Image: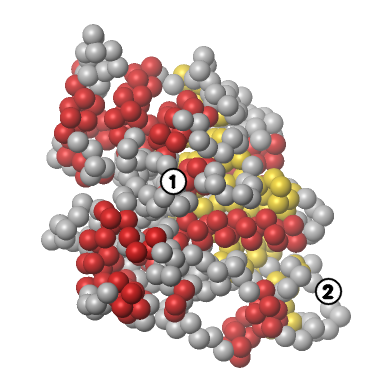
Amino acid sequence: MLFTSSIYSAAQLVANLVFQVPFGSRHSNIIDTGYARYLGNQTFPNAVAYLGIPYAEPPVGDRRFRAPAPLDTGRIAYTQGLNGDVIDARSYPDFCVQGPLGPTPGGAGSEDCLKVNIYAPVGAKQGSNLPVLVFIHGGGFTFGNPRSWPFDHWVEQSPNVVIVSVYYRLSSFGFMAVPDFRDPKFGDFNAGLQDQIEALRWVKRYISKFGGNPNQVTINGQSSGANSVQFHLLFTGLREKLFHAAIAQSTPRRPLPTPEQQAPLFDFYAQKAGCGLGSVAKRLACLRSVSVSTLARAQEAALAPTYTATPYKAFQPIFDGKILTEYPTPAVQSGHFAKVPLIIGSTTNETLTNGPDIPAAWKSFCPGITGSDVDELLDVGLDSASPRILYPSSSFASEDLQKQTAMGDFSIRCTRTIMASEYSKLVPTWTYRYNQRNPTETSLGAEHSAENWMMFQGSNIGPNGTVTFTPLKPVEKAFASELIAYWLSFVRTGNPNTLRLRRSPFWGGYGKWQRLRNVLQQNQFGYTSRSGSYLEFDENPETQRCKVTGSQTSQEN
């Protein structure tokens, strides 16, 4: 269902959200937040899912393109009505408006999507004081539906945590930018990231009602969700402490354009939406009045090859000078980040860029990189007295593998090395290499997002919020349980080893003198009682390549 108006009648809300429970009856899966009572769905013997709980006001009408407004709990309380009414939270909510996935157009979803899904053990309540995991989904800040990544089976495996999955605005709805947003009367930069901050604030205020401990929160994300985790680690100007540990899975080295660099995209977007005339104020007023479908088509038009006004074609986080005040790589290298325990890793074969050759691929991913930067990355190493090729063909079995390595280092894998190298100087840090391919794909390697299939019940996302789930084989189920145990051990104790499965190897920490990482893979012989994972040392060539890559590209990502 698409929402294009800010007008909601109380009758509509009551009809959609509230049903009658007989007065005086008891229900084990009802949580009272103090302003509303929510009925959850017991999806496993030990797990209850409370789905679509709002954490902010609907960002519609004049609130479009603005930072989220804190939830009006009085409005929610009014919809609850007379004593005995509860809000049905047993079904997944409408997801946020989607951008395109590959050649398939987006547009499905709702603007009224600032919700969280909460997965808790049966009987969890205020006073249970359980550690909390908050998950931020990936999808290039363009698409993604938290329904694709369910967590009730995690709670079933370990019924001593509370897990929260966040919906946040995507594409132009969450990341449209124009320099005039420096004056908040026009709008706000990085609204989608600010949605996540507001969700964490709601968690701090209310997760105790669901049995969670607001003072023991771990944030976790994959792909652009891991980018989000990285950004939250850099939001050192926020006064509140909203989390206490972090897990970043496959963190892209995403370029951060400035508002001025995104201005041509705004002009094009407004013109395609029929709002191309007049002052910025008039164009924004127009954009706040047109339909969701109009904006969906407008945000996709810039992705066409014919759009050449700027190399920055995507609506994505920008360097706004307000919440993002430093570029990530130099900020990390300067120690300007939240000092919390960290798990960070990537898959073996992932890359987020492509092109006819390595320089073209790098340039397409990071438009600000210069020709001299490319020359240095390809031609010399760290010691100018002893030049060497960073990616010599003699070190790779094929040209394709050489290109994949160079592109993967540049776009995503080097984040693991850069962040782990700096974090491990100050806080406990663990790294991994995920080395199990998605068995439903034709790839021979462990490509980007391969771990999602294993960790989320054989999940493969489709366009416009769709998802398919494939049953796991016994050896895959055994491996998935190892991954979940490592992750939740970290959430519960700050260390992935404390509550790992007995068959899983001890995960050595990452440090200057011992660059250990865990190679995560299932048992190659199909045994369910033996782990296939093992430890390796971060290879020196990769470490050196990432030092050069980090130093040459840090002014944009």
Looking at the image, which residue is at 57% across and 47% down? Answer: 219
The spot of residue 98 in percent (x, y) is 38, 66
Residue mark closest to the camera, 1 vs 2: 1
Q: Is residue 203 visible?
A: yes
Q: Nearer the viewer, residue 417 or 43?
A: 417
* Image quarter in which the C terminus is found: top left
Amino acid type at circle 2 is Arg
- Judged left or right of residue 286, residue 524 is right
Q: Is residue 434 visible?
A: no
Q: Residue at x 59, y 62 (%)?
A: 117
Side (left or right) of 262 relative to 23: left
Q: Residue furthest front?
A: 183
Name which residue lies at 65% across and 65% down.
50
Report the Cα–Cα distance between label 1 and label 2: 50 Å
Q: Nearer the viewer, residue 386 or 412?
A: 386
Above or below 40: residue 368: above
Residue shown at 50%/18% (left/top)? 512
**Crowd class of label 1 (few under 14; some 14 to 19; many from 20; radius 10 Å):** some
Q: Position of residue 400 (x, y in %)?
A: 21, 32
The part of the image, by quadrant, that contains residue 429 is top right
In the rendered view, tell whether residue 93 sits above or below residue 307.
Answer: below
Q: Which residue is mark 1?
A: 325
Question: Which secondary structure, mark 2?
Answer: loop
Whichever of callouts 1 and 2 sits on the residue coming sooner in the sequence is 2
| Residue 220 % position (x, y) | 54, 46
For residue 18, what is the image quadrant?
Answer: bottom right
Q: How busy is the neighbourhood of tag 2: few (under 14 within 10 Å), some, or many (20 plus)? A: few
Q: Marks 1 and 2: CB-CB under 8 Å?
A: no
38 versus 151 height, above or below: below
Q: Which residue is mark 2?
A: 26
Which residue occupies the extreme right position in the image? 24
